[in-house]
Amino acid sequence: MKFQDKVVLVTGGGTGIGRAVARGFAREGARVVVAARGLEALEQTVKLVESDGGRASALVADVSDSASVAGLVEQVVARHGGLDVAINNAGVFAMGEVADLPEEDFTRVVGVNLTGVFLAMKHEIPAMLAGGGGVIVNVASQVGTHKRIPGLGAYAASKAGVTALTRTAALEYIGRGVRINAISPGPHDTSMSMRPGETEADRAERISRQLPIGRVGSLDEITGSVLWLASEEAAFVVGADIVVDGGSTA
């Protein structure tokens, strides 16, 4: 039980990687708070955590809105007495070549994926400093810093920004007890890895040809990487961007 009684906040906790990570922390004894804009999905995550024998609660928040994020962190601290670990995972996606991509799509993707991480850290870090320290893991992507794909310019720009912001913040706060890193997943078993009109079988065939490992990543595999990065076993890892992509960018 590596995270026994630790308070863990997971944004984007209603689906995909966020849901899997929340369940992983809860299995290790954490008190997990999942946050997103949709309550129904969050409540499903809470039910799954509780069915595993864990503890979780849900709070609605919009990571692109500073007041909403401030209120989220305040509620976590008020309910649980502090904040030990934050996984900033909330993200959205838009496809389109640069000249064709609607401006509102670019603004939305950057607002959630990059500004959302900035606002999360802006409010999480003071709460952690007040409690004597903490750990932050920001979910970036192989697409951005490590790999470019035509049609994903907005997403790549936002995730490359997450990596740069993570490394800068890591240097600013490690001396005060807040350890910050990023993780960059490749294709995993989530809706974001699916192309329009593609079935899971189609995706499996496509990715088996693209990735050296020959398969899509499981949610348990990315969860294990996040938990390790947040644990004391990774205490000397600061400002890193851990790529978990089956060899795609090797």
Image (cartoon, rainbow, N blue to C red):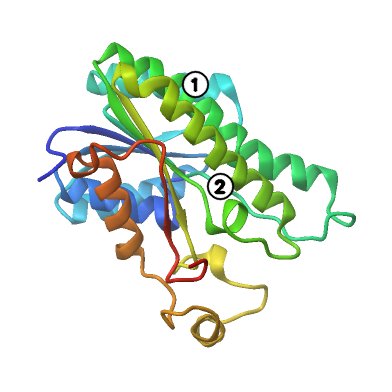
Kind of residue sitting beneath label 1 = Lys
Q: Find numbered disc 1 in the image and state the secondary structure of the residue it sits on.
A: helix
Place residue 198 in its image quadrant.
bottom right
Q: Residue at x 57, y 34 (%)?
A: 116
Q: Is residue 63 above or below residue 127?
A: below
Q: Residues within 10 Å of mark 2 (few under 14, many from 20)?
A: many
Q: Which mark is residue 91?
A: 2
x 30%, y 64%: residue: 220
Residue 174 drawn above or below residue 8:
above
Instruction: Answer yes or no: is residue 63 visible.
Output: no
* Quarter where residue 150 is shown: bottom right
Q: Amino acid at mark 2?
A: Gly
Residue at point 49%, 85% (across, down): 208
Secondary element type, mark 2:
loop
Q: Answer above or below: position of 222 versus 120.
A: below
Question: Where 215 sits versus 53, above or below?
Answer: below
Tell me where residue 183 appears, x and y as whole percent. 42, 49
Residue 87 x %, y %:
38, 40
Could you say which is closer to the camera, residue 71 or residue 97? 97
Q: Is residue 138 left or right of residue 33?
A: right
Q: Could you say which is closer to the camera, residue 39 or residue 124? A: 124
Residue drawn at point x = 56 percent, y = 19 percent = 67
In three-dimensional space, the C-alpha distance between marks 2 and 1, rounded to whole angstroms, equals 17 Å
Q: Position of residue 81 (x, y in %)?
A: 23, 18
Q: Which mark is residue 122?
A: 1
> Residue furthest toward the top?
130
Q: Is residue 141 left or right of residue 15?
A: right
Nearer the observer, disc 2 or disc 1?
1
Instruction: Pinpoint residue 18: horizontal percent, then vertical percent.
Output: 40, 50
Decide which of tag 2 and tag 1 comes sooner along the chain. Answer: 2
